[in-house]
Image (cartoon, helix red, strand yellow):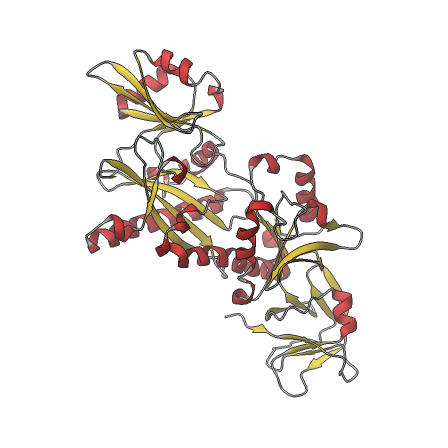
């Protein structure tokens, strides 16, 4: 269990720059103090009164750009240097000029994310490309205090948590250059980098026998013949964008043998759920996908999911790595499709339920929770092992078919948070905000003590 310590500022020091906690195990004299990217040479001694507290001179506070925010922080010792922190930079885009809403509509989410600082013992802050002062090694960082948002100059962080909002921002050349510079020139670990490609995820997971059985047959669109074959095998298929999110652009295609017709269920441009009928697959595809590039679409095996009141059900399962780097399931919610909807998303009329609400039997509740947990943890470990970069959280869309088998539909590197609108899932909302910052503490320690393991 890592210990956290209060940090105080005082000019009542006896010929030293810093007093360190009396219970801190020191194997060699401390010569430097580090706070994020700032370091300073120091003279220091254990607290003369035997207290477990850090006290530093104002001059040292100024040199480190250390803010007096009344947060107990961790201490890490390595190579005669005492590291205070960690500083966790949360990188995003879309900043505004409004002081009360500096990140626009996402300001509340970031305020809630930063609010876990005292729980975990770290100093997280939000920043974008425009806030970096490369010359002085400082960032005009956004922190959220009891008085609201405030910008203060802070050192470069120990680690960076990627919260870019969409693929468009991620593809910007300038943002990509900043990420490369911070990683390569400053050796700052960067976690949760990038949005997943659906096909790339499936191709990686197919190589792992522990999880390959969870994958429905999935291909990039190649021909009408292949769709005909999959319709014959499975009864229905889904066609979805390889780089899509929020259920946008998902189409379900069904073939009815009795009337020899093809049906397509999708959400129209007017945001209404549609069901259209065609006598030929080619006619359906040309009409429904006339504005879309089929070469960027995936064709996925349809699964006959469990249903509630004739509506299909799937599950969102969040996993996070914790303060020790281990994977944990942090939230499970059922999503019941809205009337006539092709997906279970809330914006298409979907309803969030807990597992206990979905299944009346306690044995069913325990069984399905255990099955979903086992699948999500194995999928998380497999993606961590096969994906470039450091992954700290994943949101899985999983289904359970009528035989009780679990299937993976999608994995999201930046999972949405709509399930936490359910009142019984609010504790899990806190946990899924707390663990990404706690994982940042673990990464910071690894970067200080075992950098070769992170940057190999």
Q: Quadrant of residue 250?
A: top left
Q: Can residue 185 be seen in this view?
A: no
| Image location (x, y in percent) of residue 103 | 61, 47
- For the view shown, which residue lies furthest in the bottom direction? 49
Q: Is residue 420 above or below residue 407?
A: below
417 left or right of 191 in image: left
| Image location (x, y in percent) of residue 298 | 43, 26
Front-most of 285 and 446? 285
Q: Can residue 297 be seen in this view?
A: yes
Residue at 21 percent of width and 55 percent of height: 362
| Image location (x, y in percent) of residue 339 | 30, 33
Front-most of 273 and 35? 273
Q: Is residue 343 above or below residue 97?
A: above
Front-most of 24 and 423? 423
52 left or right of 421 in image: right
Q: In which quarter of the image is residue 177?
A: top right
Residue at 33 percent of width and 32 percent of height: 341
Residue at 62 percent of width and 71 percent of height: 70
């Amino acid at each position: 269990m890592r210990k956290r310590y209060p940090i105080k500022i005082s000019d009542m020091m006896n010929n030293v720059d810093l007093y360190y906690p009396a219970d801190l195990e020191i194997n060699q004299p401390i010569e430097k103090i580090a706070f994020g990217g700032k370091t300073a040479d120091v003279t220091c001694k254990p607290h003369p009164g035997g207290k477990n507290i850090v006290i530093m001179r104002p001059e040292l506070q100024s040199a480190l750009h250390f803010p007096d925010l009344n947060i107990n922080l961790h201490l890490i010792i390595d190579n005669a240097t005492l590291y205070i922190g960690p500083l966790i930079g949360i990188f995003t885009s879309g900043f505004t000029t409004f002081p009360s809403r500096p990140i626009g509509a996402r300001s509340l989410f970031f305020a809630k994310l930063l609010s876990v600082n005292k729980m975990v013992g770290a100093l997280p802050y939000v920043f974008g490309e425009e806030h970096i002062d490369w010359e002085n090694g400082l960032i005009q960082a956004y922190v959220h205090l009891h008085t609201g948002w405030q910008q203060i100059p802070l050192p470069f962080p120990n680690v960076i948590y990627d919260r870019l909002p969409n693929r468009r921002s991620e593809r910007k050349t300038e943002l990509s250059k900043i990420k490369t510079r911070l990683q390569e020139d400053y050796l700052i670990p960067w976690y949760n980098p990038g949005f997943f490609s659906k096909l790339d995820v499936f191709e990686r997971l197919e190589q792992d026998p522990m999880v390959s059985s969870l994958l429905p047959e999935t291909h990039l669109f190649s021909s009408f013949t292949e769709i005909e074959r999959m319709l014959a095998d499975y009864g229905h298929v889904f066609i979805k964008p390889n780089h899509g999110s929020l259920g946008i652009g998902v189409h379900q295609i069904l073939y009815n043998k009795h009337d020899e017709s093809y049906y397509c269920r999708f959400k129209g441009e007017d945001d209404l759920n549609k069901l259209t009928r065609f006598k030929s697959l080619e006619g359906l595809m040309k009409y429904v996908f006339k504005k879309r590039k089929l070469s960027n679409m995936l064709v996925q095996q349809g699964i006959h999911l469990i249903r509630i009141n004739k509506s299909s059900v799937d599950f969102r399962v969040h996993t996070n790595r914790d303060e020790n780097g281990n994977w944990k399931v942090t939230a499970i919610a059922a999503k019941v499709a809205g009337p006539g909807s092709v997906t279970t998303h809330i914006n298409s009329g979907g309803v969030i339920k807990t597992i206990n609400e979905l299944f009346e039997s306690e044995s069913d509740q325990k069984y399905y929770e255990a099955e979903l947990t086992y699948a999500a943890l194995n999928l998380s470990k497999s993606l961590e092992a096969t994906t470039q970069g450091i992954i700290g959280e994943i949101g899985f869309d999983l289904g359970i078919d009528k035989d009780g088998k679990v299937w993976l539909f999608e994995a999201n590197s930046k999972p949405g948070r709509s399930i936490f609108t359910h009142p019984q899932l609010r504790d899990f909302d806190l946990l899924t905000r707390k663990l990404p910052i706690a994982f940042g503490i673990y990464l910071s320690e690894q970067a200080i003590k075992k950098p070769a393991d992170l940057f190999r």
